[in-house]
């Protein structure tokens, strides 16, 4: 028997810029994870009650995550801290520079579980970035 409010869904909340990488990745993840998806450019107030997992997606401009993501995470800190929250970053840096940037952005946003997908990263035979596939698998667990 299950009682009370059930929170089993996944929400993907993202901001993308003119490159469209974040939007494309978020949409792919939403399809694979059967998740609900929210574009912070269209909506900044999101009721996260019915989700137990929240995935935040952003790009990086001049070392910083997109402003709409920074504001959203700041404004919803208590709720996000109460969920399984993960971060994905689309960026151009890879290797040590990419690792260091991801670590810094993850720390600054206060989301320890973070992964990044370089624009020119390795892709599989379906054109999907390898990191994205393993990230999705992890989100299913
Ligand atoms: C003006 C500008 C500045 C950028 N600065 C960085 C940066 O500091 N570090 C990085 O790794 N990528 C940087 N990038 C790459 C973007 O973060 C990357 O292309 C990302 O996929 C953008 O998201 P979008 O495609 O959804 O717009 C920059 C891109 C632009 C256009």
Image (cartoon, helix red, strand yellow):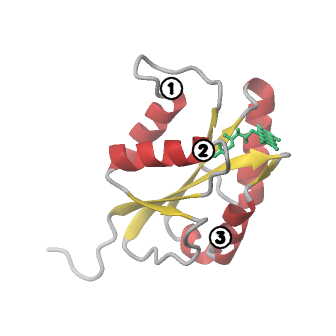
The image quadrant in which ligand 1 is located: top right
Q: Few, some or many C-alpha atoms within 10 Å of disc 2 (few <14, some 14-19, many ≥20)?
A: few
Residue with the most extreme right position: 62
Which numbered disc covers residue 130? 1
**Quadrant (top left, top right, bottom left, bottom right) of the N terminus:** bottom left
- In percent of width and height, residue 113 lies at 59, 49
> Could you tell me which secondary element the residue under label 1 belongs to?
helix
Q: Residue furthest bottom?
A: 4
Quick one: label 3, few (<14), some, or many (20+) residues within 10 Å? some
Q: Which mark is residue 17?
A: none
* Residue that extends furthest to the front in the rendered view of this protein: 18
Q: Is residue 102 visible?
A: yes
Residue at position x 55%, y 72% from top?
43
Q: Are marks 1 and 2 in contact (CB under 8 Å)?
A: no
Q: Secondary structure at mark 3?
A: helix
Residue 50 location, x and y as percent? Answer: 37, 73
Quote the CA–CA distance across marks 1 and 3. 28 Å
Q: Residue at the location (44% across, 48% down)?
A: 27
The residue beneath circle 2 is 20
Please tell me how crowded label 1 is: few (under 14), some (14-19), or many (20+) other residues with Cα within 10 Å.
some
Tell me how far mark 1 sits from mark 2, CA to CA. 18 Å
Is the CB of the residue bearing disc 2 within 8 angstroms of ligand 1? yes
Q: Residue beneath label 3, please? A: 72
Q: Residue at 71% of width from left, 70% of height from top? A: 71
Q: Nearer the viewer, mark 1 or mark 2?
A: 2
Q: Is residue 134 above or below residue 120?
A: below
């Amino acid at each position: 028997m299950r009682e009370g409010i059930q929170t089993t869904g996944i929400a993907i909340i993202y901001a993308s810029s003119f490159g469209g990488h974040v939007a494309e990745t978020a949409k792919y993840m939403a399809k694979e994870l059967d998740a609900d998806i929210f574009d912070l450019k269209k909506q900044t107030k999101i009721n996260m009650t019915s989700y137990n997992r929240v995935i935040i997606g952003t790009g990086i401009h001049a070392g910083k995550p997109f402003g709409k993501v920074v504001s959203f995470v700041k404004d919803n800190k208590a709720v996000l801290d109460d969920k399984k929250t993960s971060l994905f970053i689309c960026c151009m840096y890879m290797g040590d520079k990419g690792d260091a940037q991801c670590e810094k952005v993850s720390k600054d946003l206060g989301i320890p579980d973070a992964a990044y997908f370089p624009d020119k990263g390795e892709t599989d035979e379906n054109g999907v970035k390898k990191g994205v596939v393993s990230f999705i698998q992890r989100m299913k667990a």
